[in-house]
Amino acid sequence: GARVVKVEGARRPEGARRGPADFFALLNAGKESVALDFADDADRAVLRALIESADVVIDASRPRVMASLGIEPEQVVASGRTTWISITGHGRTGDAALRVAFGDDAAFEAGCTVGDPPMFVADAVADPITGIYATAVGLAALVGRRGNVVDLPLATAAAYARGAGGPRGGPYPDGVPVAAPRARAVVGAAPAFGAHTEAVRAEFGYGRRP
């Protein structure tokens, strides 16, 4: 029932758009698509307005990206209205904040492997694990206290799910049976890139661009 606005860089669309169309539709059906030029002052203002109007912001970039746009998550959440979920590779602070991570290498770092030599337990498994935690945080924020920046590093989330540092107390042994994957039916189409950009610009008083 939520209104979900997906924001992408006008010059750098999400890479998943180049993959299988059905997979992209599973992830993005029902969302609005906004494409903004982050080098443009007016588009940065639209981005700020969108963020400040949101109940939950989900950001999947390193901290330096928002800093380069003049947007500080801590300032955004200070009003108490918005919760900012920051999905990083290795955290928001220190040298780790500069490190890039993907689902496979983050899971490998977290010890989500089996066998010798070690093999991945699943393809890019740190991504869905972190997504599940982000979903729980977002839902909790909608019904409870807001005004927080929540750092969800891929590597830490994968390690927690594995049991390293989590409530289960230790790594899982090899040979734990896993259910076979089940295909999900595509129930809607993903919006075209930037399909809602002009409507959102107008919503925040910036009008149609030439």
Image: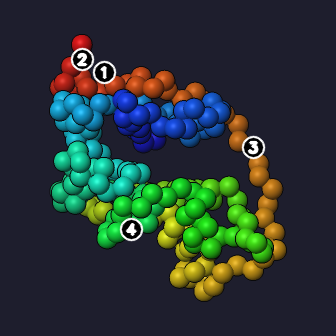
Q: Nearer the viewer, mark 2 or mark 1?
A: 2
User: Where residue 156 appears, x then y in whole percent?
Assistant: 49, 71
Is there a contact, CB below 8 Å, between mark 2 and mark 1?
A: yes
Is there a contact, CB below 8 Å, between mark 2 and mark 3?
A: no
Q: CA distance from mark 2 to mark 1?
A: 8 Å
Q: CA distance from mark 3 to mark 1?
A: 35 Å
Q: Is residue 19 left or right of residue 193?
A: right
User: Where residue 164 appears, x then y in whole percent?
Assistant: 57, 80
In the rendered view, tell whether residue 28 sits above or below residue 151: above
Question: Residue at the location (65% across, 33% down)?
Answer: 20
SS label for mark 3:
loop
Disc 4: which residue: 96
Is there a contact, CB below 8 Å, between mark 4 and mark 3?
A: no
SS label for mark 1:
helix
Question: Residue at the location (53% across, 55% down)?
Answer: 102
Residue closer to the observer: 177 or 187? 177
In the rendered view, tell whether residue 170 sits above or below residue 194: below
Disc 2: which residue: 209
N-terminal of the pair, mark 4 or mark 2, is 4
Disc 1: which residue: 198
Q: Is residue 72 visible?
A: yes
N-terminal of the pair, mark 2 or mark 1, is 1
N-terminal of the pair, mark 4 or mark 3, is 4
Q: Report crowding for label 1: few under 14, some 14 to 19, many 20 or more residues within 10 A (C-alpha).
A: some
- Checking the image for residue 183, the label placed there is 3
